[in-house]
Each structure stands twice: as C-alpha cells, then as structure tokens.
Amino acid sequence: MYVTCYKTSNHFRTTENNSSNYQLVTNKNSWLYFTLFRTAIMLQIFVCGAQGVGKTTLINTFLQRCKYNNGIVTKSAKQIVINEETATIIQEIARTILKEHGLTTGLQLRQNKDLMWQLQKWIIKKQIQKEAQSNKTIVISDRSILDPMVYGLQICKDRFDSTMYEAFMKDGNSDALDDEVRCAKFSDWFFPPFVDDSQEMSQIVASIERCRKSVFILISPRPDQLRRNEKDAQRYPMVMEELQEYTTIYKKVLHQLRIPFRNVFVPDLQERINEFESTLICLLYTSP
C-alpha cells in the first residue's frame, strides 16, 4: 500500500491505494503533473525515510537489476534506459561524512547533540553540492537535503522557536493558510537555523526549488527493521517510536513546502522495486 500526495487547485490531499493505480499521478490537475511536465525539467527521484527502512537496499537492488538487463527497465510494454549516460545516482552521504570526521558509532551522536547538529549541516552542504553537479536526464538520490533537516528538527528542537514548533507539530498538515503564504512562513522558521550566511541560504532555497520539481518516495518504518538497526553501530540509536515520529515530521515538512511524495508501506523488496520502476515509467511516459 502507498499514499500519493497531490495538489488540486487549492489544497493538498492524500489518497490511499491498494494497487498500482497511477491515475492521480498522471491527472493533469495533479501536483506531480504540474511540477514535472509543465516545467519541462529533468526527472529527479529522492528515496527518503528514517534510518534502516531499506532506502539504500531498494536503490542498489534496482541498479543491479538494471545492470543485468543492460540498463533497460520495462513495464507495460514501455521502456527506459538507466545507465551512466542517462542517469546520475547520488549515494547516501551520511556514512561518508561520518568516516571523514572519525565518527564510528551512533552513540557518539546520541551523547552530543551539538555534534549531531553539526553533522546535519555537513550533510546538507554535501547533498547540495552533489545535486548541483547532476546534469543527466534522470537523477536518483539516496536521501535528500530534507533528511538531515528533519533529523535536526526532531533531535535538536531546542534550536527552533518553541511556539512555532508546537504549532507545526499540531497543525503541520493544515490548509488554513494559502499554499504560498503557509510555505513562506514555514520556510522563514525552518531554514535559518541550518545556515551561517546568505550564500548558504540561497543554496538551500535553490535545492528546495529542485525538490518541488521532483518526486519523493518516503518509506515508512516497520518493527522488523529494529533488528537490522541494532546490528549497525554507526546508526544513531532510535527506537520504533522515534522512527515513526521522524516519518510523521517528514510528511509534515513535505506538506508545508509543497513537495510531492509517495508514502510507501509495502515490506517486500520486490514489491518496492516494482513500484519504483512503475513510477519511473509512468512519469517519463506521461506527456502534456
């Protein structure tokens, strides 16, 4: 099961689906249609979610399948080619940053919130750099600029205005305000703690604009993933309630920033890959 977030003329809605029905995605009134096909940009897909939900596994398995099939992805008699000439793959940045700074265990971050906060800022800068270097038709990214921001908001909430934080957590999906007004108000509160100067703010704003013209696949956590997390000492230690809270905050942020996303719940890897491939095919073959 997945949830597709789309935008009508005046507000967001979410619709639950139990089968691969892409009617909402290809509808000319949908948010995905507007952002992807009316702006004539490259296709960017960000695979996101809490740690250990299977983002990297999904992307790597998909790429292995592409390599085995000479880069050809086929669905419903339609094909796309994923190879070095057509696609840029942005691998997960966090582990590289951790290694560069000699951070070997998640407990180091759990015990030092200042270090945890700084780590998110390092990841944001590197993610922006990687995105800016992408010039292929298709960009597939393991996480996005929003992943470290959501971690920062969840774990280091004391760096944000408390009144605004409480309002965000209570009414994060509210449509009481006009889309653009709500988005601007949220951005003025959410972004400044992560930047040190106006140049960094400009880079974040540019990255968010790219996000609005992209598709986010947000994978929800499941109880069985805790066993995998416990075996990975480099991960920031989190219990299931924290992983679920992270996902809830992520969805609220996406709503506030008017970024389209698909919330994936299916546990089976093969089903996830099928959904991923069908999404690629659907988006590339839909035309105005």
Image (spheres, rainbow, N blue to C red):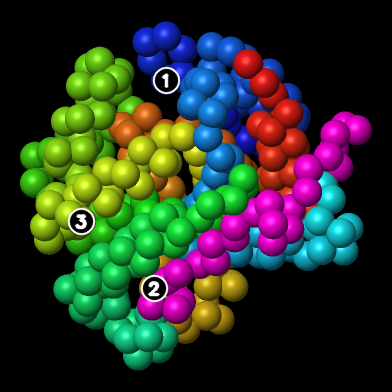
Q: Closer to the camera, 254 or 238?
A: 254
Residue beneath the point at 42% across and 71% down: 94
Q: Which of pointers 1 and 3 indicates the residue nearer the eye?
A: 3
Percent x, y of residue 30? 53, 17
Is residue 55 in view from this perspective? Answer: no
Residue at point 26%, 59% (across, down): 152
Q: Which mark is residue 12?
A: 1
| Mark earlier in primary sequence (1, 2) | 1
- Please tell me which of labels 3 and 2 falls first in the chain: 3
* Span colored in magenta: 74-97
The answer to whether residue 141 is left or right of residue 66 is left
Give the Cα distance between marks 1 and 3: 29 Å
Amino acid type of disc 1? Phe
The amino acid pointed to by label 2 is: Tyr
Q: Say which label, 1 or 3, has the lower sequence index.
A: 1
Give how far apart the Cα atoms at labels 1 and 2 are.
32 Å
Task: Specify whether residue 275 is painted magenta.
Answer: no
